[in-house]
Image (spheres, rainbow, N blue to C red):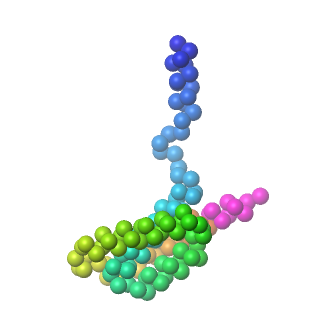
Amino acid sequence: MKFFALILFVLCLVPPATAAEPAADIGLAEVGVMGRLNGQALACSHMEAVSRIKALIIKFAPKSRRYGEAFETATNDEYLAQARKDKTACPDATAFSEQLDEAAKRLQTVFAINANDKNAP
């Protein structure tokens, strides 16, 4: 009986699977989104978008190997996936720019929150 009580107690300590992601994981996910957009922009020859994405990553994402690798991996994966598709699968520049605007806002928000957390007393 004590064994089952101990197991029940331990299970109560395990956080639910739906718990919110830590801020770092959310930031890493947003860097991955920017990487995927970068890969698509490269494959679709949206070179202005490529420049903008890199500037956003440099400005807002932490300068660490973890974030750099996430960005590069997502870029490479999406570039290869886009290259396998027909060129007609590329979004037009306007639609792509709107998608990038939304992702840029999320990236800025996530890392502004993280910066505020680090500056908290």
Q: Residue at x 31, y 78 (%)?
A: 91
Q: Residue furthest right?
A: 121
Q: Is residue 121 above or below residue 54?
A: above
Report the side of 4 relative to 46 (left or right).
right
Q: Residue furthest top?
A: 1
Report the side of 6 relative to 44 (left or right).
right
Q: Residue at x 24, y 80 (%)?
A: 87
Residue 78 appears in the figure: yes
Place of residue 16 in the rendered image (x, y in percent of width and height, measured from the top left): 50, 39
Q: Is residue 106 above or below residue 58?
A: above
Whether the magenta-drawn stretch holds residue 89 is answered as: no
Place of residue 75 in the rendered image (x, y in percent of width and height, measured from the top left): 41, 71
- Quarter of the figure with the C terminus: bottom right
Q: Residue furthest bottom?
A: 48
Q: Tell me which corner region of the image, top left, top right, bottom left or bottom right, holds residue 118.
A: bottom right
Q: Identify the magenta region.
A: 113-121
Q: Residue 94 or 25: which is nearer the viewer?
A: 25
Q: Residue 83 or 30: which is nearer the viewer?
A: 83
- Counting the numbered discs, the total is 0
Report the side of 31 relative to 87 (left or right).
right
Q: Tell me which corner region of the image, top left, top right, bottom left or bottom right, holds residue 58.
A: bottom right
Place of residue 60 in the rendered image (x, y in percent of width and height, measured from the top left): 58, 72
Whether the magenta-drawn stretch holds residue 116 is answered as: yes
Q: Residue at x 47, y 69 (%)?
A: 71
Q: Residue at x 54, y 39 (%)?
A: 15
- Give the main secondary structure of the magenta stretch: helix
Residue 99 appears in the figure: no
